[in-house]
């Protein structure tokens, strides 16, 4: 019954997206001095979550969805990040990577907060203390 809650699936998808994005950022930092390397990033979580598995979501009434979007792993390194190119053709900016890493931490913390809050609501509904 509780394994199909959309809010828990969304929290899991958000955490997975944050982890994949952190991996892309780490790869960018690791290749900061590689000639010709292009910095990459993932599409935003909102874009990837809306895309789902390609099946459109159907609303049976306002505020209700009868078809859940199945979770998919985000495609790593999906899009190139625009930036100024160094003389060797590298587009990694360590400053932008630091900002992106802070953004990923915020995304992961939000996913964890959504999960923890949802679990607290479920526990309260079952008459247990959170």
Image (cartoon, helix red, strand yellow):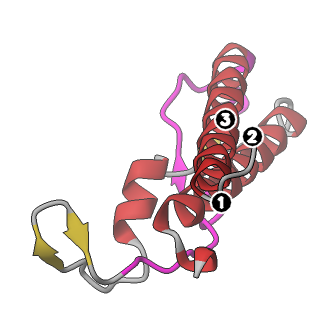
Q: Which mark is residue 12?
A: 1
User: Going 66% across and 44% down the picture, which residue do you hit?
Assistant: 120
Q: Label 2 crowding class (10 Å Cα cut-off): few <14, some 14-19, many 20+? A: few
How far is disc 1 from disc 3 in space, using C-alphas?
37 Å
Which label sits in the foreground, 2 or 1? Answer: 2
- In the rendered image, residue 51 lying in the magenta stretch gets the answer no
Residue 41 x %, y %: 59, 45
Relative side of 116 to 23, left or right: left
- What residue span does the magenta drawing correspond to? 68-94
User: Can you give x and y, in whole percent of width and height, for residue 83 in the image?
Assistant: 52, 27
* Quadrant showing the N terminus: bottom right
Can you say which quadrant of the picture contains the C terminus? top right
First in residue order: circle 2 vs circle 1? 1
Sequence order check: which comes first, mark 1 or mark 3? 1
Instruction: Indicate the quadrant where residue 50 lies.
Output: bottom left
Task: In the rendered view, tell whether residue 58 sits above or below residue 113.
Answer: below
| Secondary element at tag 2 | loop
């Amino acid at each position: 019954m509780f394994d199909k809650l959309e809010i828990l699936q969304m929290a899991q998808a958000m955490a997975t997206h944050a982890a994949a994005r952190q991996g892309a950022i780490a790869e960018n930092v690791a290749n900061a001095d590689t000639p010709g390397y292009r910095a990459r990033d993932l599409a935003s979580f909102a874009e990837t979550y809306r895309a789902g598995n390609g099946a459109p979501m159907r609303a049976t009434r306002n505020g209700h969805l009868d078809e859940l979007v199945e979770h998919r792993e985000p495609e790593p390194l999906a899009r190139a990040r625009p930036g100024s190119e160094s003389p060797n053709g590298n587009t990694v900016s360590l400053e932008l990577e630091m900002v992106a890493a802070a953004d990923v931490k915020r995304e992961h913390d939000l996913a964890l907060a959504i999960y923890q809050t949802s679990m607290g609501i479920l526990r309260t509904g079952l008459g247990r203390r959170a």
